[in-house]
Amino acid sequence: MKRLWITALDKDEVGVQRLMAAAKAYGLAASGHFWTDDLAKLAWAGAREELGHSDTGAWAILATPETLAKASIRQGLALLALELQSRKGPGFPVFLLAQDTAPSVTDLPTPLRGAQTFRLEDPALAVKLVAAANRPLTATGAEYRLALYPTQGLGLWFEVGPALGESWNGALFGVSVGAIDAHGIGPKGRLPERSTLEYPMQGLQLELGGTPHTAWAVRNILDPDSSYYLRVHDLAGSLVFGPFPEGDAAELFRIQLN
């Protein structure tokens, strides 16, 4: 049986119980948690194992306009969504639910803009949840690889690399707000214990989407089985990453986090 994972941004026990009962009435198991807003302690990562479980078929986020307006909550949700997409793919179904009025996704962080929005009272919601949770995920042609490693004691690490069948002649990763303090090259899927960096660069300044970013980079050649890893502190704003720019031809990707 597929399962719905519920994240309640507020202590709305009545709303959670109503949603769980509706899901179970249609044969969908349901469980979840109340959100802890603490970016410094990587509290958003507490649900990643449950969300990444093979039985979890959909993610429902119960929100209010006030909670969705808070920058730290938006960023925590965006990071958790990124981590989930790295495990299950960008097509994993996410539902954003609120009382009375369905939330808008147009101004949400990039990883949440594909969410389906409903009023919690919508009579069609349970059917939509069950259908989404049981629908096979369709593989999409990703342009890059991106994974997160939130680890107490080691901090928040990002892994970036080229998609299957491609290679990068070097890599770059930058943040609009925050500080990068370590980087390395290694096999995909695990943080490297040691690495050799070719022409490492720090403190590069670039602008993308009208926003300045500070970036680190290397000139190591990356294939689909190797990745660039970076640790970031006090992250906010947006990320930029991709192959090292050659001349004026920059092919960088940007992800807005709040």
Image (cartoon, rainbow, N blue to C red):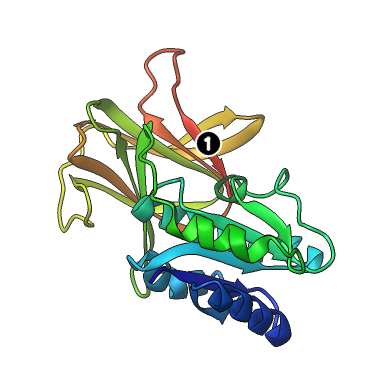
Residue at 75% x, 66% y is: 98
User: Badge 1: how crowded within 10 Å, few (<14), some, or many (20+)?
Assistant: some
Question: Which residue is farthest right?
Answer: 100
Q: Position of residue 83 (x, y in %)?
A: 42, 57
- Position of the N terminus, as image quadrant, is bottom left
Task: From the viewer's side, name the closer residue of 75 and 112.
Answer: 112
Residue at 37% x, 16% y is: 246
Task: From the viewer's side, name the closer residue of 173 and 125.
Answer: 125
Q: Position of residue 178 (x, y in %)?
A: 54, 53
Quick check: 43 left or right of 124?
left
Q: Quadrant of residue 241?
A: top left
Residue on which the image places disc 1? 254
Give the vertical position of 187 relative to 27 (above or below).
Answer: above
Give the vertical position of 248 relative to 1 (above or below).
Answer: above
Q: Confirm whether residue 258 shows in the render.
A: no
Q: Quadrant of residue 72?
A: bottom right
Question: Which residue is farthest front?
Answer: 26
What amino acid is labelled 1 in the image?
Arg
Q: Position of residue 168 (x, y in %)?
A: 27, 27
Q: Confirm whether residue 122 shows in the render.
A: yes
